[in-house]
Image: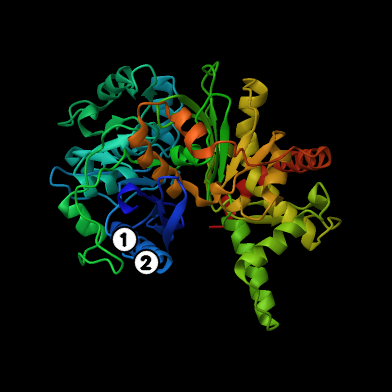
Amino acid sequence: MKGKTTLGIEFGSTRIKAVLISEDYITLASGAYTWENRLEDGVWTYHLDEVWRGLQSAVTELSDDFRSRYRESLSTVGAIGISAMMHGYLAFDKDGQQLVPFRTWRNTTTEKAAKLLTEKFRFNIPQRWSIAHLYQALLNNESHVKNTAFITTLAGYVHWKLTGQKVLGIGDASGMFPIDSTTNNYNTGMINQFDSLTGDLGWKLSDILPKVLRAGEDAGLLSTEGAALLDPSGNIPAGNIPAGIPLCPPEGDAGTGMVATNSVAERTGNISAGTSVFAMVVLEKALSRVYPEIDMVTTPTGKPVAMAHCNNCTPDLDAWVKLFGEVNETFGVKVDKSRLYDILYEKALAGESDCGGLLSYNYYAGEPVTGLEQGRPLFVRTPDSRFTLANVMRALLFSTMASLKLGMDILTEKEHVRLDTLLGHGGLFKTKAVGQRLMAAALKTPVAVMESAGEGGAWGIALLAAYMLHTDEPLETFLAQKVFGKNTGTLIEPDPHDVQGFAVFMEQYTKGLGIERAAVEYLK
């Protein structure tokens, strides 16, 4: 059994998760490690030593879980896949030394570079893309730029250290630099344009980007050094994972989200809602023009995808839930965390459809969709607002969806993109039906949630590792026939009462953005 299993590891924004799946794509064991990004010197970052500490902890926990379930050690796996948060900036010199701290997707410090590149390429370059970070560093005259020999994403970095291969799955690569879906590679015309902007730096852009690979292609083998990084002791408590195991192309969380929700075919889409929130829609045709609110990325096989991405989703909501938990504990009542979330989420369904006049902004970080470089979480009400727990929870949940709504309206109302359903996954959808129902109302589109989607991107990248054994068929066929079958999830249609209430909330939310801008200006 062990040689036919696949191991998926994803570095999420708050958790590193490892999932082992069977040849029937069922989860056999899992492990996790909790971490948080840090704001250091104005930069959102993670330390790379914690990358490996977290990876080792998650894999060890998984192997312990495997041993406790099956009474045998995990001695090998059939294939491995690495996934992580997309975008950001990891730069290394010719000796493989990190040049500057990891700049994550959450940073909104590249506005000038993103704007200039968007104008030059006539293609939307968001602030969080790797090329925007590189060009902003050049505009800032940062000394490390001339010493740069390789830039990559977090998934690309981990894969490189495990295999020695400087490669990237096409979906993750599409968040570094624009992809030409006719060649399934970086857009060569735009690469030449970039090189013409930078002058003689001692390198060309094509020299420092990772090689692009599509799902199913050979991405190298686990090296002896890589095996030691998975298990530095050489003896994981539940067994030793040896060198020589094949790895699939490393992918970003957008691509693994598409795979985990069977949303890789045209007219399908998914919503990932956790620390950030984004919707991915596989297009039937190109958009009519460039929109700064919409990113163009790809599926793991290179199909064009429109992505509406927002930096802020659940952190403010999580902070409120934690506060309510502290209130309970003050009175000597201890409520299980999962139960607390369920109770509070379900309370939102009892609230007034428009939240009773309450208004919430969940901006922990800047939000490019609404033109904010920084964030200040805010809760606003008028003296005559109905300040009840149900309305508070409904406003907090609506806040997680509001910025996404602005981006999705461009696709559905301006571009008339057709969607049969959207598949939801991520923390916002863990409580049964609540986030799903409100999201359907917000986007005026049916939203489905699968039981398997709770496994998230770690399961998605494990499926991509398994797909290497089935490359004689398209990824869409592999997922639809072998993995998901008739499992289309539990579907919730938009409720007209909820739709009307969200529209009222959204009107006030849009008018009130000036309050948020003032908070950024005056609350330092």
Sort mark 1 into few (<14), some (14-19) or many (20+) by Cα contacts within 10 Å: many
According to the image, label 1 marks what residue?
74
Q: Which amino acid does label 1 sit on?
A: Leu
Q: Residue at x 33, y 36 (%)?
A: 469
Label 1: state its secondary structure: loop
Left or right position of 160 against 315: left
Left or right position of 355 against 50: right
Q: Residue at x 29, y 32 (%)?
A: 217
Res. 109 visible in picture: no
Q: Do callouts 1 and 2 mark residues in contact (Cβ within 8 Å)?
A: yes
Q: Where is residue 201 in the image (x, y as percent from the top left)?
A: 18, 31
Left or right position of 66 against 281: left
Sort mark 2 into few (<14), some (14-19) or many (20+) by Cα contacts within 10 Å: some
How many discs appear? 2
Q: Which amino acid does label 2 sit on?
A: Arg
Q: Position of residue 430 (x, y in %)?
A: 61, 54
Which residue lies most toward the bottom here? Answer: 332
According to the image, label 2 marks what residue?
67
* Cα distance between the residues tagged 1 and 2: 7 Å
* Image position of 49 with respect to 277: above or below: below
Q: Which residue is drawn at 39% across and 48% down?
A: 104
